[in-house]
Image (cartoon, helix red, strand yellow):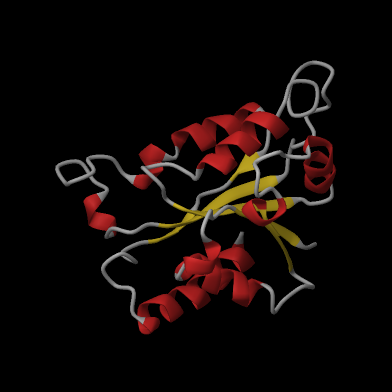
Amino acid sequence: MKTLIIVTHPEIENSLVNKRWMEELNKYPEKFTVHQLYKVYPNGNIDVIAEQKMIEEYDKIVFQFPVYWHSCPSLLKKWIDDVLIYGWAYGSKSGYKMSGKKVTLAMSAGVDEYEYNPGEKYRYTLKDLTRPFDLTFEYVKADYQPFFAYYGIELNASKEWIEKSVPLYLEFLESF
C-alpha cells in the first residue's frame, strides 16, 4: 500500500531538507505519492472534495512540513480546518472517513533538539507542541503515530547534514 505524503512548505524551492526529502520520495513512486499543498493551492483555495477523495484512497498519511513558529505552515492548518469537517471526518453521520488510517508528521526543525526542553530556550518538547495534531487525529479516529523530526538544520545546513537526514526519513517511513 502506497503512503500519501502531504508536503506543506510555502517556499519549497528555497528549502534544504524538505526539498531533498521530496526528491528522494519521488524516486519511489510505487511506495509514495507526494502531494504539495502550496503547489496545488498557491492561492489557498482548497478543493475539499478532491482532498477528501484522495485521503480516502490511502491507509497511511504523512504530513511533512518545516516547523514554523512552533507549529505548521498556515496552509496545513487551513487544510485541516477545511478538509476534516463534520459529516466527513467526524460526527454521527460521517462514517469517520479517517478512522483507522495511520497518520503521522515529518518535520524539519531549525534548532537543535535539546532546545525543545524544559529549562531550555523553547521550554517545550516538540511532542508537547504537536499535541493539537495528536488530539485532532484522535478526534477523527485516525491512528496517530509518533512523528519524525530532523533538528538543527538552521545551524547545520551543510550538504552532509542534509544527506544524513534522507536515510533516517526513509527508514522512518518504512517502519510507519
Name the residue at the top extreme: 92
Name the residue at the bottom extreme: 160
Q: Quadrant of residue 53?
A: top right
Identified at 47% across, 66% down, the residue is 15
Horizontally, residue 7 falls left or right of residue 100, namely left
Residue 6 visible in this rendered orientation of the protein: no
Horizontally, residue 171 falls left or right of residue 1, namely left
From what the image shows, is residue 133 above or below residue 159?
Answer: above
Identified at 84% across, 18% down, the residue is 93
Query: How many marks are shown on the rendered structure?
Result: 0
From what the image shows, is residue 149 above or below residue 92?
Answer: below
Name the residue at the front extreme: 43
Identified at 33% across, 74% down, the residue is 157
x then y, percent, for residue 4: 72, 57
Instruction: Give the camera-side residue of 59 and 44.
Output: 44
x then y, percent, for residue 152: 31, 64
Q: Quadrant of the N terminus?
A: bottom right
Q: Quadrant of residue 48?
A: top right
Instruction: Give the camera-side residue of 16 and 111.
Output: 16
Instruction: Give the camera-side residue of 6 and 74.
Output: 74
x then y, percent, for residue 176: 61, 59
Identified at 47% across, 67% down, the residue is 14
From what the image shows, is residue 172 above or below residue 120?
Answer: below
x then y, percent, for residue 80: 63, 35
Residue 2 visible in this rendered orientation of the protein: yes
Horizontally, residue 169 falls left or right of residue 158, namely right
Instruction: Give the camera-side residue of 174 and 42.
Output: 42
Q: Quadrant of residue 2?
A: bottom right
From what the image shows, is residue 147 above or below residue 123?
Answer: below
